[in-house]
Amino acid sequence: MAGLVGNLLILFFVFQNICLGFRSSLSVFKRYKETTRLLSNECPGSDRPVISVGLSDFALDIRMRGVTPKQSDTYLCMSVPLPVDDEAYVVDFKPHASMDTVHHMLLFGCNEPSSTENYWDCDKGTCKDKSNILYAWARNAPPTRLPKGVGFRVGGETGGRYFVLQVHYGDISAFRDKHKDCSGVTLHLTHQKQPLIAGMYLMMSVNTVIPPGEKVVDADIACHYKRFPMHLFAYRVHTHRLGKVVSGYRVRNGQWTLIGRQSPQLPQAFYPVEHPVDVSYDDILAARCVFSGEGRTTETHIGGTANDEMCNFYIMYYMEAKHAVSYMTCTQNMNPEMFRNIPQEANIPIPVKSDMLKMMHGHHEETKDTDKSSLLQQAKKEEGEILDQDFHIEEAVEWPGLDLKLGQVSGLALDPENNLVIFHRGDHVWDENSFDSKFVYQQRGLGPIEQNTIIVLNPSNAKLLNSVGKSLFYLPHGLSIDKNGNYWATDVALHQVFKLGANNKEPLLILGVALQPGSDKNHFCQPTDVAVDPITGSIYVSDGYCNSRIIQFSPNGLYMMQWGEETSLGRARPGQFRIPHSLALIPDFSQLCVADRENGRIQCFRLETGEFIREIKHKSFGRELFAVSYAPGGLLFAVNGMPYPGEAEPVQGFVMNFSTGEIIDTFIPVRKSFEMPHDVVASADKTVFVGDVHARAVWKFASTEKSERIVEARLKNNPESTESLKKQEKQHLVQQTRTGVSFVLITTLLIIPVVVLLAILVFIRWRKTTVYGADGEHKLDSSSGRILGRLRGKGSGGLNLGNFFASHKGYSRKGFDRLSTEGSDQEKDEDDGTDSEEECSAPPPPSAPSSS
């Protein structure tokens, strides 16, 4: 009897625990939310700074420990020990900071930090021993990418054992809400030996004085190099507000070779060295900072506060591992006379407009609240872009815009409200009969397109918001929108460029002569695209199918300059074009990038001078690159053309790191297939639209890591859907609750029969004991023992419900198999691509130069 009572008690406690374990899912959800809220107040990485990434790699999160600086120009430091004893290599950096709170960050490597506190005032120093700069960041710079096989050596016998993060908080007005700052950097480290070791060479002026009101003041630095050869791959410039331009050179046998030149008022990234530069024994490294003391009433000295100045030129280099030196400095000017021969470009300031200066400097600037708010929003937006450069985009398959009835889609743009604007050809097509051999349009008898050629759509649900452009165009091509919302469009039949107000029927400005091709200052020949500088208002036109040039006009449409020439035989040289087809203006870097279509490349030029900066070309582009677009934060998007017969490169979209030109991702649609993707446009939140002139379609692509942001944007653009979403959330919550209750109910129903059965057995035993005595008791014990034995499980003294349920047919411990959600490409048409509605594509490169 005692054994039976014990077993009954066991069943009671099991039943009680099951019921407690499946309390209402509402209470569980509440506890989860409270825990999440608690953790969200902590700095990320503080509880788990080291994350394993594969067998030999790991990530180390280095963040400020939730600090709130009390005064402007505060320098705070904190240290993190290297989590391993043996040698490791830093191969990548990812910053976490925004210019509205942080002026700049430096990461040092050393063996003994200046303090063991969680964080300290950097006036105490950074390290007690020799320290090496591993990384520098300022003003929303994009991530630094190290070349393959290159790493900073840490740990072991020669590398530092601590990382020390120094953060300079300039203007602390952003901390009025007393929030805690967690700025920092994430490092990617590996144990795999790197054949090439990275290092930092710092050129720094220490004694420059800038007199008040002085228009031009030069700070020169030069040192002889006395070590093994090093290879330079990135550079960064740094001054405060008075710096106009910083330039660095290698001088060998009297020849000056540019390492890098940049305005310190633009985002202070580590920019790639455009052309490989090696430095050998006895070469000279030279740098010049150009300052202006205008506006100052007292002398300005080199110093650590925002009202002081700095003149720094950082060089990232790599050397063979056996000769590697991790950190070198140059703070002198060994030969002032040599700077008489410095290239003239080093003395020419790179202009940056005042609104850009306000955005870049967060120090003691008095701006209107509205201006400051918009600048901070822009900074935060750019920060979000920078911190998420590793991502993947896929087609937004639920977007209904793909089903729109359009003509040939030639141009796409986004207006200031982020609405999608499509430029299409209505019932007109560009085919082999459109032009004669002199590029004169042959179908004027058709008249202009009678449909609205410019349509404005809600980017979330593709609802029509506006449409204009009726009876204006013959063969639309390129489209862009300036910061004031004006439309800039090109027409290849009219050979003209139009400026249109969003609600104006008549053009505000027309460039070119209608239906007259030409190549002088007043004519175009099939112009392809337009870009307008948001800072200066200058107009840039790519001209075009039968000219090979970029033309700059003033905001009023006056001719200013042009550059470019037709591609010669052999390899296309810098500044040569074979159909400059699409433009992307990058105001942050003062550059204009051109999709050089038939040369299958992107060329980037300085806005002010038209000077060639660099080429971006990849084998996967194939022979044709149709369009290019820039997204704030350092991402470049492009689409290529269909492969030629016998070639393998597929037609697809590309995502690239603007600073390095590296391809981060590629993308293709799930619904339909690209046929001739003609234009691409990307928004600040990495939403991408692609227009196809042959498929007459527009696809929408979105980052797979931004689903929450997409939902928020959807709600913002479609407020009426808010209630339905709330209902869905409520239904989901009720369903969770019902699920919990159902589980408890099922469990209860399973337990009750067992309890009833045991009660019956107890009653039978009592009756038998009364009637039959001890004999009956023996029989009952054996019967109940068999039943409880089954419940306990074989050879077990405790209750095992898992084994009990597992013994029943159909029960499985496995969850549902994950459903595949990956789409597949539709089969491509096997026709020969000679559809008459396809825009004419340039033929393969001829044996002699051609203008088309």
Image (spheres, rainbow, N blue to C red):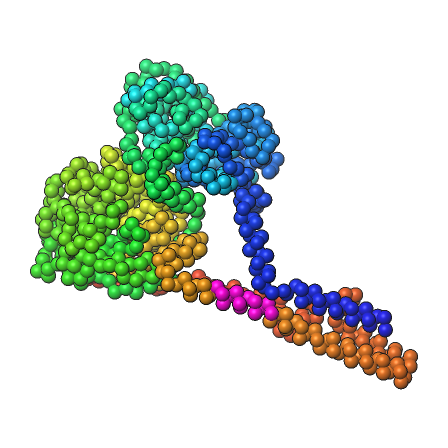
- Determine whether, in the image, residue 729 is placed left or right of residue 676: right
The relative height of residue 207 versus residue 817 in the rendered view (above or below) is above
Residue at 55% across / 66% down in the picture? 736
Identify which residue is drawn at 22% across, 57% down.
454
Q: Name the residue at 43% across, 26% down.
A: 305
- Front-most of residues 267 and 495: 267
Q: Is residue 740 magenta?
A: yes
- Most common secondary structure along the magenta stretch: helix
Which sits in the foreground, 733 or 109? 733
Q: Is residue 2 visible?
A: yes
Instruction: Please tell me whether residue 291 belongs to the stretch shown in magenta.
Output: no
Residue lying at 36% horizontally and 48% vertically, measured from the top left: 684
Quarter of the picture containing the N terminus is: bottom right
- Which residue occupies the extreme right position in the image? 774
User: What is the count of numbered marks?
Assistant: 0
806 sits to left or right of 500: right
Residue 531: name its quadrant. top left
Residue 309 occupies which quadrant of the picture? top left
Corner quadrant of residue 239: top left
Report x, y in % for residue 555.
Answer: 19, 41
User: Picture coordinates of residue 276 (x, y %)?
Assistant: 36, 32
Q: Is residue 198 visible?
A: no
Q: Is residue 719 above or below residue 805?
A: above
Residue 238 x, y percent position in the rendering: 39, 29
Q: Is residue 428 left or right of residue 773?
A: left
Task: Give above or below for 806 relative to 411.
Answer: below
In this view of the protein, which residue sits in the foreground, 274 or 746?
Answer: 746
Question: What is the span of residues highlighted in magenta in the rendered image?
Answer: 729-741
Q: Position of residue 421 (x, y in %)?
A: 26, 55
